[in-house]
Image: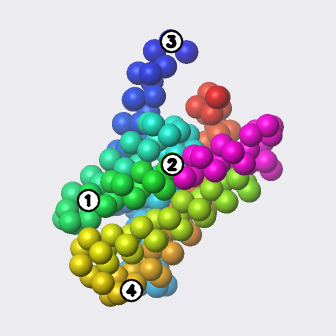
């Protein structure tokens, strides 16, 4: 493709915007408390689709912007790094697990789920560390673990489903 770098920058910018919107606007009631959003689904897709540079940047920046715009600026620096790490873990594991396999729905599900689980476990642990140590909440930060686990579960399910659907509808995005 001609101008492939420009194309990736444009897609990354759109994914960052989608991450921000999915985090701020799309809310699903949670049995834990409050709601979960679809931001993590897009964060995982950033890693799976865009890879280690553009995907990591889109996931981190889009999530950070959501914190800033939603009046949680004290979480913005941590969110930038944490969501970037989630996208990176998802990319690395997904790429390793599907290497050498034909790209079809059957061969995608397990790599998507395993890489999503690893990324979301990192998210839960890193938010706990960030809130307990850097924000000074101590062990009280553990109260956010159940909600973050629910957030991660929704992100994995929705993200994997969207990836499979989009990979069928827009196969040119998924060529290596």
Disc 2 to disc 1, C-alpha distance: 18 Å
Looking at the rendered image, the disc whose residue lies closer to the viewer, 2 or 1, is: 2
Kindly indicate whether the residue at mark 1 contacts the one at mark 3 (C-beta within 8 angstroms): no
Looking at the rendered image, the disc whose residue lies closer to the viewer, 3 or 1, is: 1
Kindly indicate whether the residue at mark 3 contacts the one at mark 2 (C-beta within 8 angstroms): no
Looking at the rendered image, the disc whose residue lies closer to the viewer, 2 or 3, is: 2
Q: Is residue 18 visible?
A: no
Which residue matches tag 2? 88
Q: Residue at x 26, y 65 (%)?
A: 75
Q: Which residues are magenta?
A: 89-108
SS category of the residue bearing label 4? helix
Mark 1 or mark 4, which has the lower sequence index? Answer: 1
**Neighbourhood count class around disc 3 (C-alpha, 10 Å): few under 14, some 14–19, many 20 upward:** few
Kindly indicate whether the residue at mark 1 contacts the one at mark 2 (C-beta within 8 angstroms): no
Which residue matches tag 1? 76
- Identify the coloring: rainbow
């Amino acid at each position: 493709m001609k101008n492939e770098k420009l194309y990736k920058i444009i897609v990354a910018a759109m994914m960052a915007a989608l991450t921000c919107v999915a985090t701020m606007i799309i809310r699903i009631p949670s049995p834990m408390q409050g709601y979960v959003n679809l931001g993590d689904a897009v964060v995982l897709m950033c890693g799976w689709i865009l890879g280690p540079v553009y995907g990591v940047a889109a996931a981190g920046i889009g999530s950070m912007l959501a914190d800033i715009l939603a009046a949680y600026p004290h979480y913005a620096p941590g969110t930038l790094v944490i969501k970037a790490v989630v996208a990176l873990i998802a990319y690395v594991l997904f790429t390793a697990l599907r290497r050498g396999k034909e790209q079809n729905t059957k061969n995608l599900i397990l790599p998507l789920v395993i890489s999503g689980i690893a990324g979301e476990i990192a998210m839960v642990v890193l938010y706990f560390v960030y809130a307990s140590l850097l924000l000074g909440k101590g062990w009280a930060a553990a109260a956010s673990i159940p909600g973050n686990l629910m957030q991660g579960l929704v992100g994995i399910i929705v993200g994997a489903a969207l990836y499979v659907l989009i990979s069928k509808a827009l196969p040119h995005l998924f060529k290596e």
